[in-house]
Image (tube, coloured by chain):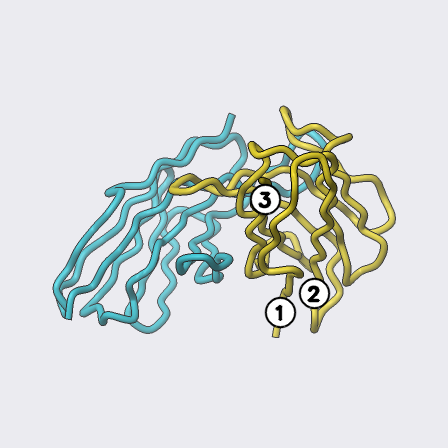
Chain colours: A yellow, B cyan
């Protein structure tokens, strides 16, 4: 149980375009979903937290107009990177939680902006 | 600001050679300390959550312990399949009232057959 999927697993896009990443909890309802970014050989950095039906809360330094998060249901959250630039290339990972003492992570999405 | 420091950065062991990974932390209001395993190009896989000093949890060849300032992940008689990056994270409540994980940079463990 507690499986989280992400789609796509990798994506290449051109600078200036937008890309959407989906995160789904497959076998449980997630009251909270989290989005992280991980650069090579660095730690996971929390970008934002979203609760179903409410606006996401963003960590300091994360541009909310650039990284749009929608948590439309208890099993789906999406992250849209708008007007992507090469510096946005990274590994984006979501996690889902049904209780405060657990977070289950998706497999990640590798974004490359050319 | 919550901080997590993991050491060593990388560790190479012979198969069967036991060792420990360290995670030291500073946090305002620890809600839990998490250990994850991460394979290259994949998301973290949950291993343990510890809540209070003195607590221990075991899973196969892994045992996690917690004090007020640090946590250890002991690996006993490791096998090559235990090779991975092991991540430690502390959970606290953010300024927005959400549960938040702050991760360390991990220990990259390699088990040599």
- Identified at 57% across, 34% down, the residue is A86
Q: Nearer the viewer, residue A36 or B62?
A: A36
Q: Is residue A90 left or right of residue B65?
A: right
Residue A7 position in % (x across, y down): 67, 61
N-term mark: 2 or 1: 1
Residue A89 position in % (x across, y down): 56, 40
Give the vertical position of B69 relative to B66 (above or below). above
Q: Distance between the residues labelled 2 and 3?
A: 16 Å
Kindly state the secondary structure of the residue where label 1 is placed. Answer: loop
Q: Nearer the viewer, residue B45 or A84?
A: A84
Q: Report if residue A22 is visible in the image.
A: yes
Give the vertical position of B20 relative to A25 (above or below). above
Q: Report if residue A102 is visible in the image.
A: no
Which residue is identified by label 2?
A25
Query: Which of the chains bears the disc numbered 1?
Result: A
- Front of the two marks 3 and 1: 3
Query: Which of the chains bears the disc numbered 2?
Result: A
Q: Distance between the residues labelled 3 and 1?
A: 18 Å
């Amino acid at each position: 149980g507690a499986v989280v999927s992400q789609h796509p697993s990798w994506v290449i896009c051109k600078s200036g375009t937008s890309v959407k990443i989906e995160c789904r909890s497959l076998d449980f309802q997630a009251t909270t979903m989290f989005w992280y970014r991980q650069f090579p050989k660095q730690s996971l950095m929390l970008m934002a937290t979203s609760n179903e039906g409410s606006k996401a809360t963003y960590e300091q330094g994360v541009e909310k107009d650039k990284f749009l998060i929608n948590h439309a249901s208890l099993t789906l959250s999406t992250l849209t990177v708008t007007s992507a630039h090469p510096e946005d290339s990274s590994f984006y990972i979501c996690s889902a939680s049904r209780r405060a003492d657990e977070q289950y992570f998706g497999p990640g999405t590798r974004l490359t902006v050319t | 600001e919550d901080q997590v420091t993991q050491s060593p950065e990388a560790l190479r062991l012979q198969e069967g050679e036991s060792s420990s990974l360290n995670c030291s932390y500073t946090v305002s209001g620890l809600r839990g300390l998490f250990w994850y395993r991460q394979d290259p190009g994949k998301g973290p896989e949950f291993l343990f959550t510890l809540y209070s000093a003195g607590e221990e949890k075991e899973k196969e060849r892994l045992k996690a312990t917690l004090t007020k300032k640090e946590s250890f992940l002991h690996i006993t008689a490791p096998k090559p399949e235990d090779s991975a990056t092991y991540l430690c994270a502390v959970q606290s409540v953010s300024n927005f009232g959400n549960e938040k994980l702050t991760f360390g940079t991990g220990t990259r463990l390699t088990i040599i057959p």
